[in-house]
Image (spheres, rainbow, N blue to C red):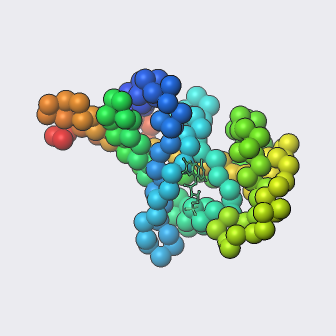
Amino acid sequence: MVAPWRSPLARSLHKHRHLPHARYLQLATVTPTGEPTNRTVVFRGFAESNDGLQFVTDHRSAKIQHLQVNPQAEACWYFVETREQYRISGRVQIVTGDERRPLWEALSAKARQQFAWPHPGQPRAESKAFAVAAPALPPDTFWVLRLWPDRVERLALRGDPQDRWHYWREGDTWHQVDWNP
Ligand SMILES: Cc1cc2nc3c(=O)[nH]c(=O)nc-3n(C[C@H](O)[C@H](O)[C@H](O)COP(=O)(O)O)c2cc1C
């Protein structure tokens, strides 16, 4: 069964397909010491025939250390033209191995090159350390994240009063309720 929040989200994405930055969203994780952290990532599509939201990242990045201790995360995604916000919470699966391949192949050469750059989040290396060729195959630094939602909230500012929908999953069953804004 397709989750009930998928079709509004697909519609929001479709209406913003002319805006590449509509695929940017914020993904929050929790540090091992319990502090919230947040960063912008690019939505790289749904996992094949299911509800997992996919992102790519460098395995040396801090968010990986957070997720390895606590896989819980929340995405916050605002669509400018339809004035909708989605908050999507769930657990993040870290994908390594061959399953990364299709997402690696979909990346531009410039995006691929970044995975061969010096360690992110360290003092800046010399410029020549960044002048590297884009690897042909997914390097060990390239990891895929899959956020498996178990709670989604959609807020549409357009209504008067505004509309807020809450979706949550119990096992394979999704429930839905309309909330006061
Ligand atoms: C528009 C935009 C898109 C970004 N896309 C990604 C992305 O898809 N994956 C990623 O790991 N970081 C992406 N970043 C960089 C992150 O926001 C962040 O700076 C980096 O991942 C390090 O975060 P961390 O130290 O919390 O792991 C993007 C930044 C911007 C401004």
Q: Quadrant of the C terminus?
A: top left
**Image quarter for residue 86?**
top left
> Residue at point 51% right, 51% down?
40
Q: Position of residue 124 (x, y in %)?
A: 70, 69
Q: Is residue 2 visible?
A: no
Hey, which residue is sitting farthest bottom in the picture? 33
> Residue at point 28% right, 38% down?
155
Q: Viewed as shown, does residue 35 lie left or right of 105? A: left
> Residue at point 77% right, 40% down?
109
Q: Position of residue 20 (x, y in %)?
A: 54, 33
Q: Position of residue 148 (x, y in %)?
A: 51, 44
Q: Is residue 93 visible?
A: yes
Nearer-the-camera pick, 114 or 11: 114
Q: Viewed as shown, does residue 2 lie left or right of 167? A: right
**Image quarter for residue 178?**
top left
Nearer-the-camera pick, 126 or 80: 126
Q: Viewed as shown, does residue 152 lie left or right of 128? A: left
Hey, which residue is sitting farthest front in the picture? 127
Hey, which residue is sitting farthest left in the picture? 161
Q: Position of residue 118 (x, y in %)?
A: 76, 64
Nearer-the-camera pick, 118 or 64: 118
